[in-house]
Amino acid sequence: MPVSTVRLDYGPNQLVYYPHVTYKWDHSWENEMNEAIKELVKKQIAQQVGDMPTTVEEMLGLYEIKNNQRQVLSLSLSNYTYHEKAAHGMTTIESLTFDIEKKKLCTLKDLFKPGANYVRRLSALVDIQIQERDLPTLGDFPGISPDQDFYIADKTLVIYFQLYEITPYVVGLPMFPISVFDLADIIDESGPLGRLATNG
């Protein structure tokens, strides 16, 4: 699917880039996808500016297309913002995954069979990676939430957390790649992960 870049200029040192998708077969679905992207960009900016009394000295919004094949478009939007006199800047990442075939914006739950205990399975797999990678955590790992942040990259589901969500700032945004083949028994075979898991 063709993707172009939109640039927003909010002032000195404040730039936000985000994607615009083209889907010539269905313009209403194209508009729906682009509106979802724009709304998320606006939400990120509002969260980063917040109610803080200090001035925003720097903002940079970027995006990455994580998957654009087999009728699955998954992208991430990052926003780095630094406020005057802050100890450090803050980065947030949000993602959107579109099932082009079914014309829907997917939640994490949508990737799995109805009734599958995906929260428990994914939490266990993330916990194993935390131990194997010796990641410092802010207390015991509580497991993922049913609507945990994620994106899809080829044959991998990436679960991730925001700054300070489960780890100290020094870790950054912790990412946990999980192969679709480790989830083969619970994924929706007609959904995005099922489509990407097939060969050919």
Image: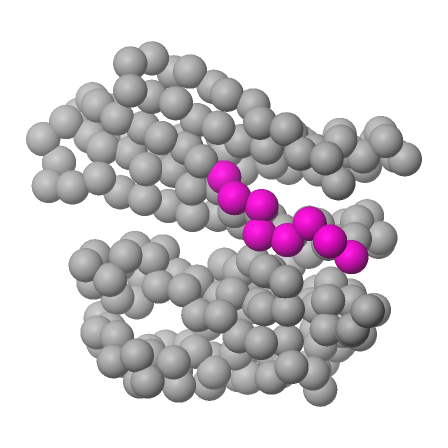
- Res 39 seen here: no
Residue 54's image quarter? top left
Q: How many marks?
A: 0
Where's the N terminus, which quadrant? top right
Q: What residue is rendered at 47% in x and 83% in y?
A: 125
Vertical arrangement, residue 115 with respect to residue 161, above or below: below
Q: Is residue 50 left or right of residue 24?
A: left
Picture coordinates of residue 197 (x, y %)? 72, 73
Picture coordinates of residue 196 (x, y %)? 73, 67
Find out whether residue 67 is within the magenta segment: yes
Q: Is residue 88 left or right of residue 27?
A: left
Q: What residue is rendered at 79% in x and 49% in y?
A: 100
- Res 12 seen here: yes
Q: Is residue 113 left or right of residue 155?
A: right
Q: Is 62 in front, or is 95?
A: 62
Numbered range of the magenta stretch: 63-70
